[in-house]
Amino acid sequence: MTARLVVLVSGSGTNLQALLDAAADPGYGADVVAVGADRDNIEGLVRAAKRDVPTFVHRVADYPTREDWDRALAASVARYEPDLVVSAGFLKLVGPAFLVEFAGRYVNTHNALLPGFPGIHGPRDALAYGVKLAGATLFFVDAGVDTGPIIAQVAVPVNDDDTEESLTERIKVAERSQLVDVIGRLVREGWTVTGRRVTIP
């Protein structure tokens, strides 16, 4: 049975595109059944439309409270009955209503080797610290900031002449490959979470 993915985006949607391309192969085991966003008129929504994938947008500014936004986002995602919800460059922190609805099924990718360098400036912070290995982490989202159980990690060497931009771009390539590979493994093989340890059989 093909797994159902709902992908959340905030920008250009390159990770979304990688998932759409992978899902075009029936052997991948998953279909992107909807794409949600927190902004209008972004490339990620265009990418979805080109594949005839339904989209929805919930802008935080359109709701009286952040809690109202969170409940509306959760309701829209739930309508598509996803097996996994994938944050692919989604730049908003979801709240309790969303996390309760999709506990253990909401995955995010971060451009650093967690638990080091959480937050929105992972590559910059890694460079400033002087690490020799940077990378990307795929994890199940919990109520913290980049603190959920780690599913997979990929290392990217830091070059002596790296800038934030050059390191970020190399991490993106590794991050995208890991995202596609591991989401496919999760849907085809399943997973277990014991404490903080995530195991894919």
Image (cartoon, rainbow, N blue to C red):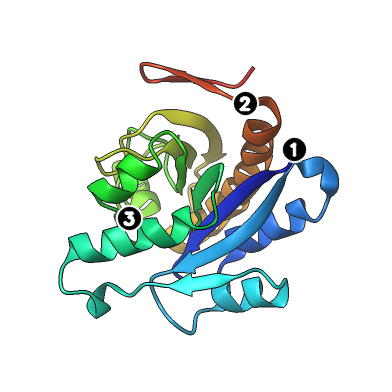
Q: Which residue is at a point 19% across and 60% down the rendered structure image? A: 67
Q: Residue furthest left?
A: 65
Tell me how many marks there are.
3
Q: Residues within 10 Å of mark 3 (few under 14, many from 20)?
A: some
| In this picture, residue 103 sits left or right of residue 190 | left
Is residue 12 visible in this depiction of the protein? no
Q: Nearer the viewer, mark 2 or mark 1?
A: 1
Residue type at mark 2 is Gly
**From the image, which quarter does the N terminus lie in?**
top right
Q: Nearer the viewer, mark 3 or mark 1?
A: 1
Of the image marks 2 and 1, the number of the one nearer the N terminus: 1
**As rendered, which of 146 and 87 lies closer to the eye?**
87
Distance from the alpha carbon under mark 3 to that under mark 1 = 38 Å
| In this picture, residue 179 sits left or right of residue 166 | right
Tag 3 and tag 1, C-beta contact below 8 Å: no
Q: Looking at the picture, how far across and down is residue 183, in whole percent?
A: 62, 40
Q: Which residue is disc 2 drawn over?
A: 190
Query: Is 166 situated above or below 101?
Result: below
Of the image marks 3 and 2, the number of the one nearer the N terminus: 3
Residue 121 numbered mark, or none: 3
Residue type at mark 1 is Met
Distance from the alpha carbon under mark 3 to that under mark 2 = 31 Å
Tag 2 and tag 1, C-beta contact below 8 Å: no
Residue 1 numbered mark, or none: 1
Distance from the alpha carbon under mark 2 to that under mark 1 = 12 Å
**As rendered, which of 100 and 27 lies closer to the eye?**
100
Q: Looking at the picture, how far across and down is residue 25, in whole percent?
A: 83, 50
Residue type at mark 3 is His
Q: Secondary structure at mark 2?
A: loop
Q: Quadrant of residue 124?
A: bottom left
